[in-house]
Image (cartoon, helix red, strand yellow):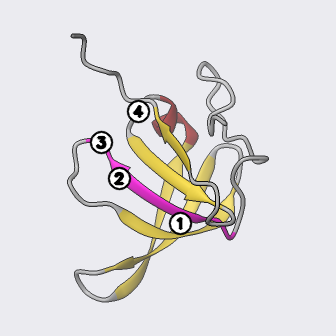
Amino acid sequence: MALIMNATHAEFDLAQIRRGDCIRVKRTGDTTAKNGFVTEAATNKLRLLYCNTQNNAASYLEITAADVAVGVWEIYWTQDFQTVNYENNAPQPEA
């Protein structure tokens, strides 16, 4: 299932992701990912709580639906650890 409901009017499908879901996000081009939990899910943004391993602290990160729609973020999320969902809208290089 797609996380973004409509690419022209970017908004999250709240039937797919909700508060308490486990999430792994990586900004396109980065080599490291952040693992955490969704603490707030709205149609226009997700707020995540993750462990910052550089200073052993809890940190928050906001991801907007507009950024996900244009491929800024690669996202894995799960509600039950049985099904892992994936979203990446980054443009694919032509062969």
Distance of label 2 from label 4 (alpha carbons): 11 Å
| Residue at 25% from the left image edge and 11% from the top image edge | 94
* Distance (Cα) linking label 4 and label 1: 18 Å
Pointer 4 residue = 71
Q: Which residues are magenta?
A: 20-28
Location of the N terminus by quadrant is top right
- Dot 3 and dot 4 residues touching (CB under 8 Å): yes
Horizontal side, residue 7 vs residue 35: left or right: right
Q: Kindly report the distance in space between the C-alpha atoms of the residues bearing marks 3 and 2.
A: 6 Å
Disc 1 marks a residue whose amino acid type is Leu
Q: Residues within 10 Å of mark 4 (few under 14, many from 20)?
A: some
Vertically, is 46 above or below 55? Answer: above
Q: Quick one: 91 or 85, which is closer to the camera?
A: 85
Q: Please identify, in this view, whether the residue under mark 2 or under mark 1 is nearer the observer.
A: 2
Asked if the stretch drawn in magenta spans residue 1, the answer is no
Residue 14, horizontal then vertical, whole percent: 75, 47
Q: Which residue is mark 1?
A: 48
Q: Which quadrant, please, contains the C terminus?
A: top left
Question: Could you say which disc has been placed on residue 28 in the image?
Answer: 3
Residue placed at 43% from the left, 68% from the top?
35
